[in-house]
Amino acid sequence: MADLSVRIGSLTLRNPVMPASGCFAIEYAEALDLNRLGALVVKSVSPDARAGNPTPRVAETASGMLNSIGIPSKGLEAYRRDVLPAYTTDARFDTPVVVSVSADTAESFGEACETLSLPEVAAIEANISCPNLEADGMAFAMQAESTYKAVSAIRRRTSHPLWVKLTPNAGQIALIARAAEDAGADAIVMGNTVLGMAIDVRTRKPKLGNVMGGLSGPAIKPLAVRLVHQCHRAVRIPIIGCGGIETADDAVEFMLAGATAVQVGTASFRDPAVMVRIVDGLAAYCDANDVERIATLTGAVALDAQLSDRWLRFAQQSG
Ligand SMILES: Cc1cc2nc3c(=O)[nH]c(=O)nc-3n(C[C@H](O)[C@H](O)[C@H](O)COP(=O)(O)O)c2cc1C
């Protein structure tokens, strides 16, 4: 059987498959063996208590879903007391736990990540796809400067492994990924949902209480694969691919584009055990294709040399 382990900076994961933040809860332990996953990524927490967005918060679309859940939060103390222990103290599994943090200023990002730099936390994922109050609510990850500022503020306050989650809504993704790397990120998560909107044609009202929301699921997969490939061209740190993954073939596609590991979001809502099926499918893919170490798939997309050069220039110039 192939070696499915992958390395994300100083962390070794038993396989490259993990849940995407907000699409997983500890109750999934009833549907799948959490020891079969590479890591467990928890729903984002914000330092201040927040109610989340107005309802309705989800709407179905042709090949995905729209959500405007927001980051409902009771704050960091309640999170450490009521949420985290279920992941870190359960003797049934020893899978590394990754906390996800959202904040609305660079400094509060730094502070929150320092507070969560606990020995039982394997890595911190900074969800910088969230609104930056110091820039009229535009997400930190929309621009290289604000990405650099937020990631540096975090890096100054923690030496924990730091994953930085980018947004597919940004234009110059290569520059943004490089800003995250330069500021000290250990890995890039590419990426979050794509901004979308849906309208009920009978009532003429937006289907989401917040009017706009994040599109996820198969609809965004080709976009996410392209962004992963551009990031892979632009940085040396590992990339964790995310967006529309439903099968082992989807996961392989992200790895060939440049991902070292993958996160599964919306697909788990339909089939809570899908991640284990993806792990089994990856092992079968490796065996069928004489792949001894899955890590060798990262960036192994077959491009002819000329095309490859053109891509490299494109990725470096514009992102
Ligand atoms: C209901 C829902 C809640 C989410 N909550 C979060 C969150 O708290 N933090 C975050 O970084 N991403 C969140 N996301 C985004 C997912 O982690 C993921 O990046 C996105 O859905 C794309 O992956 P997918 O197509 O596999 O779902 C959420 C997505 C959904 C659908």
Image (cartoon, grey):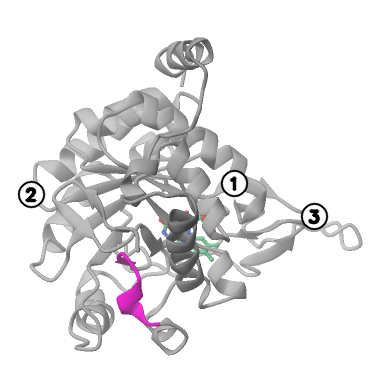
Q: Is residue 169 toward the left or the right of residue 185 in the image?
A: right
Q: Is mark 3 within 8 Å of ligand 1?
A: no
Up-down relation of residue 75 to residue 245 (above or below): below
Res. 12 image quadrant: bottom left
Q: Name the residue type under label 2.
A: Ser
Q: Which residue is mark 1?
A: 221
Q: Dot 1: within a 10 Å radius of its alpha carbon, few (fewer than 14), some, or many (20 or more) residues?
A: many
Give residue 233's position: percent from left, percent from top: 38, 25
Name which quarter of the figure residue 1 lies in. bottom left
Label 3: how many Cα within 10 Å (few below 14, some 14–19, many 20+): some
Relative to 296, is 154 on the left or the right?
Answer: left
Residue drawn 16% across and 66% down? 121
Q: Is residue 284 left or right of residue 184?
A: right
Residue 40, how many percent across, how many down?
Answer: 32, 69
* Tag 3: amino acid: Ile
57 with respect to 4 (left or right) = right
Label 2 or label 1, whichever lies nearer to me, is 1
Q: Which residues are magenta?
A: 33-40
Q: Mark 3 = which residue?
A: 199
Q: Where residue 182 sits: x, y (%)?
A: 20, 28
Question: Where residue 53 sits in the image (x, y, percent)?
Answer: 53, 64
Task: Please tell me whether residue 87 belongs to the stretch shown in magenta.
Answer: no
* Label 3 to label 1: alpha-carbon separation: 23 Å
| Cβ–Cβ under 8 Å for marks 3 and 1 | no
For disc 1, does the CB lie below 8 Å from ligand 1?
yes
Q: Is mark 2 within 8 Å of ligand 1?
A: no
| Residue on which disc 2 sits | 159
Q: Is residue 23 visible?
A: no
Figure check: 54 above or below 186: below
Amino acid type shown at disc 1: Lys
How many angstroms separate mark 2 from mark 1 (CA)? 32 Å
Q: Is residue 39 magenta?
A: yes
